[in-house]
């Protein structure tokens, strides 16, 4: 049983890992076709993963409503929002507009989801500003550099900033395209080295946490 | 103006104000909008996934084109659902092993090629350029990201930041200078990222305010004005209720 529960998954990982790592070096139509197919397969399997996540959300809020726990009314609102959107979405075949006319699903998207999402992110502007006020005081040389870079980029992104400090537009572009790019590049190289190392560990069974705990 | 646009304007305005009430404090109006947001987003994702995966990737190819091999990923996906039965949950490992194995295999050569070698190639560029008619030149323009001066700055930035994160060597002597340079580059990048994010959020805020101004028009029934008043009134009532409750509890 241990073989089926523990060794077979590791074997599947080893074989698929080696096959698809090797696929990159085989410039043959069959190899390309295999890549196209597996990409589609991963999308399909990912859809089933969504079922796991959503059912968990369903369960948590259903329990809250059934036990009438504190704030169960909000769980009810969540359910209504979710089921309502699913109902109109299926009714409209997942299309926001048909022949240029907005469907009910499109209405939900335009007048509920977009305003909620953008307002949720927009209020972060206030919190970022207050956080900046508390933490951006130039207490050290590093903090001062961070503060100056942030101010220049902010000024360079708006016409008023460019009007007040004419150089800020060019300076902002230079910071973003050169200084910021070099740091992003270094971090990307570091992260990529880590990704490759982790992938090798996974393929050869040194990293097994993705199999989860529980019984062998 | 159509009735669905008018109702839409009222709903969008109301939900926008409900979210903005969080700037005052956490309150039932915000929680209502927050939970509605989660519900609508999840519902939207479910519908889109159903349309993309079930209809476009499974149903149509199998029924219309006879691609029966697609039943294999469907079967692998079904294995994931064994998580619901504790005794058979271990079978879901096969699905996870497949996804993780394929993902790792695909990641290794592509990451090395695109994110390591390509990035190094773009960093280690010739410092001098051969311009026809001018011969070998060194370009000083800071505004041109491809200039020779910027190539040196990028090279110094990449090397110093990488060295800062390299902990196998103690950062003392010349190493300390390099690491400090890396820290400075990091701070500039963090500041730039912060400034960029703040302006992106500001742009969203301006978008919401523009909508509110548009919806204050009488052709929509002035929902911005009515709902602003109603939201403020609700907050005042709730604040009074909670303040009158507190002494009793004490």
Image (cartoon, coloured by chain):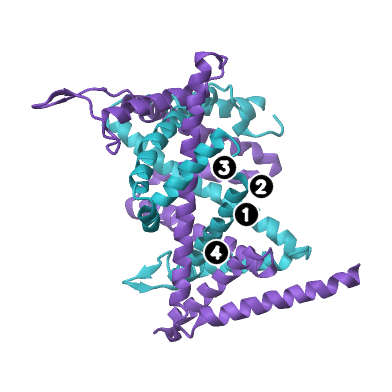
Cα separation, mark 2 vs mark 4, equals 25 Å
Residue B79's disc is 3
Can you give x and y, in whole percent of width and height, for residue A35 in the image?
Answer: 36, 35
Q: Are marks 3 and 1 in contact (CB under 8 Å)?
A: no
For the colour cyan, the matching chain is A
Real-space Cα distance between discs 3 and 4? 28 Å
Callout in the foreground (3, 1):
1
The answer to whether the residues at label 1 and label 2 have Cβ atoms under 8 Å apart is yes
- Picture coordinates of residue A123, whole percent (x, y): 56, 60
Q: Chain of mark 1?
A: A
Closer to the eye: label 4 or 1: 4
Q: Could you say whether the residue bearing mark 2 is in a helix, strand or loop?
A: helix
Toward which corner of the image does residue A106 lie, by quadrant?
bottom left
How far apart marks 4 and 1 lie (CA) works out to 15 Å
2 or 4: mark nearer the eye: 4
Q: Is residue B159 above or below residue A97?
A: above
Nearest the viewer among B41 and B160 is B160
How many marks the image carries: the answer is 4
| Quarter of image, res B155 | top left
Left/right placement of residue A69 relative to residue A197 reads right
Label placed on residue B84 = 2
Tell me the residue that label 1 is attached to.
Answer: A55
| Earlier sequence position, callout 3 versus callout 4 | 4
Residue A105 in view of the camera? no
Residue extending farthest left: B133
Q: Which residue is at a point 35% across and 39% down the rendered structure image?
A: A174
Q: Are marks 3 and 4 on the same chain?
A: yes
x, y (%) of residue B242? 79, 72
């Amino acid at each position: 049983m241990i073989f089926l529960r523990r060794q077979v998954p590791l074997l599947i990982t080893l074989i698929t890992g080696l096959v698809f790592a090797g696929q990159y070096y085989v410039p043959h139509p069959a190899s390309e076709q295999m890549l196209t197919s597996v990409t589609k397969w991963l999308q399909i399997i990912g859809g089933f993963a969504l079922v796991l996540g959503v059912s968990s959300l369903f369960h948590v809020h259903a329990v809250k409503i059934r036990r009438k726990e504190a704030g169960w009314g909000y769980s009810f609102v969540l359910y209504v929002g979710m089921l309502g959107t699913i109902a109109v979405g299926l009714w409209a075949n997942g299309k926001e507009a048909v022949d240029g006319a907005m469907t009910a699903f499109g209405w939900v998207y335009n007048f509920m989801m977009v305003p909620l999402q953008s307002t949720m992110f927009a209020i972060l502007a206030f919190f970022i500003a207050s956080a900046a006020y508390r933490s951006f005081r130039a207490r050290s040389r590093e903090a001062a550099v961070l503060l100056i870079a942030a101010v220049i980029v902010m000024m360079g992104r708006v016409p008023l900033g460019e009007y007040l400090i004419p150089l800020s537009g060019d300076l902002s572009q230079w910071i973003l395209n050169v200084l910021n790019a070099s740091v992003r590049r270094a971090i990307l190289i570091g992260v990529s080295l880590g990704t490759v190392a982790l992938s090798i560990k996974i393929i050869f069974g040194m990293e097994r946490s993705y199999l989860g705990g529980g019984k062998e | 103006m159509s009735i669905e646009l008018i109702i839409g304007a009222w709903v969008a305005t109301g939900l926008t104000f409900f979210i903005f009430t969080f700037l005052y404090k956490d309150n039932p109006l915000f929680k209502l909008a927050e939970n509605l947001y989660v519900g609508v987003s999840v519902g939207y994702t479910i519908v889109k996934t159903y349309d993309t995966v079930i209809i476009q990737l499974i149903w149509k190819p199998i029924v219309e084109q006879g691609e029966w091999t697609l039943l294999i990923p469907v079967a692998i996906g079904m294995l994931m659902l064994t998580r619901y039965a504790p005794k058979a949950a271990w079978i879901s490992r096969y699905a996870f092993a497949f996804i993780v194995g394929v993902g790792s295999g695909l990641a290794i050569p592509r990451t090395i090629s695109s994110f390591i070698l390509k990035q190094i190639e773009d960093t280690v560029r010739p410092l001098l350029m051969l311009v026809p008619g001018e011969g070998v030149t060194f370009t000083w323009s800071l505004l041109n990201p491809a200039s020779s001066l910027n190539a040196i700055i990028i090279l110094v930035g990449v090397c110093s930041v990488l060295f800062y994160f390299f902990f196998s060597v103690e950062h003392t002597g010349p190493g300390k200078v390099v690491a400090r340079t890396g820290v400075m580059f990091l701070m500039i990048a963090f500041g730039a990222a912060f400034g960029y994010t703040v302006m992106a959020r500001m742009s969203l805020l301006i978008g919401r305010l523009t909508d509110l101004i548009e919806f204050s028009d009488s052709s929509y029934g002035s929902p911005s004005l009515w709902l602003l008043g109603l939201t403020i009134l609700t907050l005042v009532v709730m604040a009074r209720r909670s303040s009158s409750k507190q002494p009793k509890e004490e």
